Image (cartoon, rainbow, N blue to C red):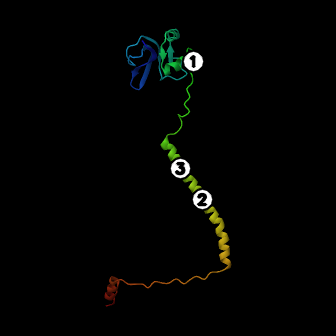
Amino acid sequence: MAVAIRLSRGGAKKRPYYRIVVSDSRSPRDGKYLEQIGTYNPLLAKDNPERVKFDEDRARHWLSVGAKPSDRVHRFFDAAGILEREARNNPNKAEPGEKAKERAEEKAEKLKEAEEAAKEAEEAAAEAPAEEAATEEAPVEEAPAEEAAAEETPAEEATEEKSEG
């Protein structure tokens, strides 16, 4: 029989309270268990000694006969010095997903284009005063603007005739 040391939930809705139990791994989480060896109240402060309480002797006994602790219980045992827990390392945990990477690349491209456009505008502004100085030396004659003949629409002609008559 595979034996597990795990948490069994109790308490009301939104007010969790757990028992640290030794049970058959095939039994349900809150179902039948072989022995209760402690309690865990996550609502208490982390430095409160009443937060996690368990019988170390019974925990050592069950571990000696092959019981496997759940991850959370393993953490409790590690904090108490009963069982050494190897720290886990997931370097990809904080890495963004594919879509987030694509959005970041697009944003970087837009920023690069904006910087290039700003740089070109600065260069154009720097060149513009030099060109203006050259144009001031040699005045250019402006071509006369051709005025388009004002064409009156038939409706306007009709109103003008009525007003005259």
Q: Nearer the viewer, residue 14 or 34?
A: 34
Alpha carbon separation for disc pair 2 and 3 = 16 Å
Q: Nearer the viewer, residue 87 or 51?
A: 87
For marks 1 and 2, give the CA distance.
58 Å
Query: On the image, which quarter does residue 85 sit in?
Result: top right
- Indicate whether 56 appears above or below 161: above
**Residue 107, label in figure:** 3
14 sits to left or right of 129: left
The correct choice, above or below, for 29 with respect to 132 in the image is above
Q: CA distance from mark 3 to mark 1?
A: 46 Å
Residue placed under numbered mark 1 in the picture: 84
Q: CB atoms at circles 3 and 1 under 8 Å apart?
A: no
In the displayed structure, 85 sits above or below 36; it is: below
Q: Position of residue 52 (x, y in %)?
A: 50, 18
Q: Earlier in the sequence, mark 3 or mark 1?
A: 1
Image quarter in which the C terminus is found = bottom left
In primary-sequence order, the first of circles 1 and 2 is: 1
Q: Quadrant of the N terminus?
A: top left
Disc 3 crowd, CA 10 A, few/some/many (<14, 14-19, 20+) = few
| Residue type pointed to by label 2 | Ala
Percent position of residue 60, x then y: 52, 10
Q: Secondary structure at mark 3?
A: helix
| Amino acid type, mark 3 | Lys
**What amino acid type is highlighted by mark number 1?**
Glu
Picture mark count:
3
Residue linked to disc 2? 118
